[in-house]
Amino acid sequence: DGGALRGDQPAHFSRDQVYASNALPQVPCWGAWRAGRTGGGGGGGGGGGGAAKRGKWRAHTVSSSCIPYGAAGVILTTDQGKERHATRDTLRALNDTYEELFPEEAAEEAAAAAAAGGEDAADAAGDAGDAATAKKSAPDVADLLAAELSELKEEAKGGGDKAAQRFKPLNLDFKACMFITMNWQAALKCAPSELVHRMLTNTRDKGSPRSRHTMRVVPVDTVCFAGVEEIKKAMLPLIAKHFPTDVTAEGAVAAGGGDGKEDAAAAVKDTEKGDGVIPGTFAIMFASRANNSMKRGPVIEAVAALVPAPYKVDLSRPELTIMCEVVKGTCCISIVKNYFQLLKYNQRLLGMTQEERDAEKGKTMSQPPKPKGAADEETPAADEAPGADEAPAAKSVE
């Protein structure tokens, strides 16, 4: 009884009572415990709340989003939380710039799309029969909006026609950072560095294309493992292409030695005399994201040693800039033109007027200093890449 269970007096149970206590009470006790855990009955201190009180098992996940070796594309920095919007705008801008450079390919794609659309329309008309042909009315606005919305969704996902297959977004599991891959057929025709330079030049000169949430657009000509020796090996073909050792009139123009053939010829003539005329200047920019093993100094020294001797370092207005962007376990490499003249390839600043740029920079500079241990702001600075430890090279190769 209750007194025996409380220890007031010794309890004596028979064998049958012991067997019964071990077998039968287990079911109601288990049910009362479950009721208390789930909130039913209030037993066991579980309280109310129902399923919200239950512990949920979640598998441990590790991000596998990485940039494939040998890929070409674009690193995109955006406003935090607006990655999808910025990626959509950049995909459209890259496709428009590519079609501007290769109008014949765009015309072929338009003709193929029109032919496919005509076949689909003919099939639809045949299926509809007389009912579709008898009803002659203007297309519904809702249908047109739905068709345009589906087209935008296909374009954002990177699927659909051949134009949308040129560029595909790759989620890096970063905030305010995305990668857009470029297929190898398009990259062979036009390197990402040339394509992005043309796009940003149009933004500066014509004011279009523009994006509200896109910040920096950094081209990537090739991707390798984030190691010093691998970076040197992947950099050699790009160095040989952009830094020729045999300085001719055409080579001087390609290297940025002058604006015309006369300037290039004068540069070659002075070089032959031994006056030490510099055929071109360069700088090295290094940035690291989600990687603590790669340091700026060894990478810059190794890359600077690959540049031929006639070329000198200019940290203020270099003609060519070597980009080394370390992302996780990969290194994205490219050589771009007019990096500082195009405001560090910041599309948002290029689309602004000078007054708007000054106001944007003043807004960034006027922010009060954050207290120690405070979290970072949601919106990064307009002229800096979020999470990037970037600095130009200061080593000259004699």
Image (cartoon, rainbow, N blue to C red):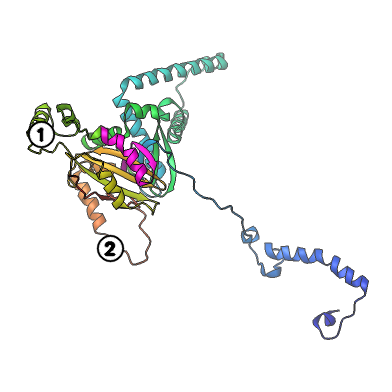
For numbered disc 1, what is the local secondary structure?
A: helix
Using the rendered image of the protein, determine whether residue 215 is visible from the camera's viewpoint: no
Q: Residues within 10 Å of mark 2 (few under 14, many from 20)?
A: few
Gap between marks 1 and 2 measured at Cα: 52 Å
Viewer-closest of 70 and 342: 70
Q: Earlier in the sequence, mark 1 or mark 2?
A: 1
Q: Residues within 10 Å of mark 1 (few under 14, many from 20)?
A: some
Where does residue 157 sit, x and y in percent of width and height?
45, 35
Residue 271: which numbered mark, if any? 1
- 58 in relation to 318, above or below: below
Tell me which segment is drawn in magenta.
Answer: 215-240
Location of the N terminus by quadrant is bottom right
Quadrant of residue 148 within the rendered picture: top left
Where does residue 231 sit, x and y in percent of width and height?
34, 42
Please, what is the three-letter code of the amino acid marked with disc 1?
Answer: Thr
Please, what is the three-letter code of the amino acid marked with disc 2?
Answer: Pro
- Residue 289 lies left or right of residue 32; in this view the side is left
Residue that carries the numbered disc 2 in the rendered image: 368
Residue 49 lies in magenta, yes or no? no
